[in-house]
């Protein structure tokens, strides 16, 4: 069957939202995704939160205020905490749209920038687009060593994959939905970023990066990734690129 040309008017985004302990941010985030451009299905994967997020998400689903003529909300609940990679894996199995985009449940990334992120796919130039926090758009100045770690891990990953990404660890990863069933993720937690990058490289996808803004949180505001997770990511780069697991 001949593939249809994707345009801003006919495209449907599958927005995968992995959620863990984001009760305070979730309603505003879902509102922003609902109001973002394009027709969308929101695939919300609740990863067994301990702060009442699951109950809130079920109430939001029952109330139906996220749904409109352009947006539908679908909710999936993990019975035990399994990690971001596992949540994305659950989401990928549910994709019905044309382009997949990952959206964290906090407010660090702005859904109004979806047109910029998926633009190279709609124009036919890319199969995969990463939104880079380091290409010049406004971002909150904070967490110097976190920034250093991100850049080191991205550089090390580039050396192995022969990509020239500036931000491998970004949340905003968008790709054609046709690749979703071909991406067999094994990482349950923060090894997800290098693993999905490795698997998309192996599928010979055309990568693009676009500049995005970034409204980062500090640890007191709920940021979860720590320096220890950097070693998990480092091992994942080796595991999925050198050993090709």
Image (cartoon, helix red, strand yellow):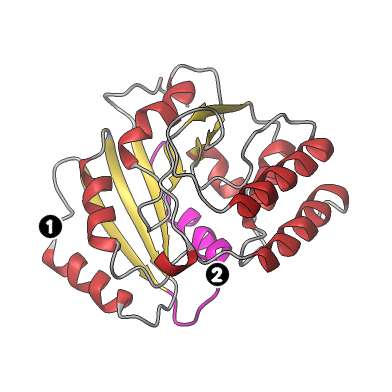
Please say if 48 is above or below 142.
below
Mark 1, Cα crowd under 10 Å, few <14 / some 14-19 / many 20+, is few
The answer to whether residue 64 is seen in the rendering is: yes
Please say if 196 is above or below 75.
above
Tell me which residue sits at (44%, 42%) in the image: 214
Mark 2, Cα crowd under 10 Å, few <14 / some 14-19 / many 20+, is many
- Using the numbered discs, state the Cα–Cα distance from disc 1 to disc 2 in whole angstroms: 27 Å
Tell me which residue sits at (45%, 16%) in the image: 123
Instruction: Determine which of the numbered discs, if any, sits on residue 150 in the image.
Output: none
**Viewport quadrant of the C terminus:** bottom right
Please say if 42 is above or below 227.
above
Residue 89, magenta (yes or no): yes
- Along the viewing direction, whichever of 227 and 90 lies nearer the viewer: 227
Q: Quadrant of residue 116?
A: top left
Tell me which residue sits at (71%, 29%) in the image: 164
**Residue 235: percent from the left, percent from the top?**
79, 60
- Along the viewing direction, whichever of 180 and 36 lies nearer the viewer: 36
Q: Quadrant of residue 198?
A: top right
The answer to which of marks 1 and 2 sits earlier in the sequence is 1
**Residue labelled with disc 1:** 65
**Residue 199: percent from the left, percent from the top?**
69, 45
**Residue labelled with disc 2:** 83
- Along the viewing direction, whichever of 108 and 199 lies nearer the viewer: 108
Q: Give, as a single range, the part of the protein colored magenta.
A: 78-98
Query: Could you tell me which secondary element the residue under label 2 belongs to?
Result: loop
Query: Could you tell me which secondary element the residue under label 1 belongs to?
Result: loop
Please say if 96 is above or below 44.
above
The answer to whether residue 96 is seen in the rendering is: no
Residue 84, magenta (yes or no): yes
**Residue 87: percent from the left, percent from the top?**
50, 64
């Amino acid at each position: 069957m001949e593939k249809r040309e994707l345009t801003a008017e006919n495209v449907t985004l599958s927005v995968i939202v992995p959620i863990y302990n984001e009760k305070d941010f979730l309603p505003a985030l879902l509102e922003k995704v609902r109001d973002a451009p394009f027709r969308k299905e929101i695939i919300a994967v609740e990863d067994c939160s301990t702060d009442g997020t699951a109950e809130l998400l079920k109430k939001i689903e029952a109330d139906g205020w996220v749904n409109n003529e352009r947006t539908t909300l679908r909710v999936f609940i993990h019975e035990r905490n399994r990690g971001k990679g596992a949540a994305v894996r659950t989401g990928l199995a549910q994709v019905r749209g044309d382009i997949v985009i990952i959206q964290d449940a906090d407010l660090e990334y702005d859904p109004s920038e979806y047109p910029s992120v998926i633009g190279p796919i709609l124009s036919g130039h890319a199969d995969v687009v990463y939104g880079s926090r380091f290409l010049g758009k406004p971002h909150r100045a904070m967490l110097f060593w976190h920034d250093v770690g991100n850049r080191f891990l991205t550089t090390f990953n580039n050396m192995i994959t022969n990509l020239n990404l500036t931000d491998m660890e970004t949340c905003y990863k968008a790709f054609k939905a046709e690749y979703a069933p071909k991406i067999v993720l094994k990482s349950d937690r923060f090894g997800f970023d290098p693993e999905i990058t490795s698997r998309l490289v192996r599928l010979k996808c055309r990568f693009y990066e676009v500049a995005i803004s970034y409204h980062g949180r500090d640890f007191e505001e709920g940021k979860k990734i720590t320096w220890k997770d950097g070693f998990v990511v480092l091992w994942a780069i080796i595991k999925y690129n050198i050993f090709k697991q």
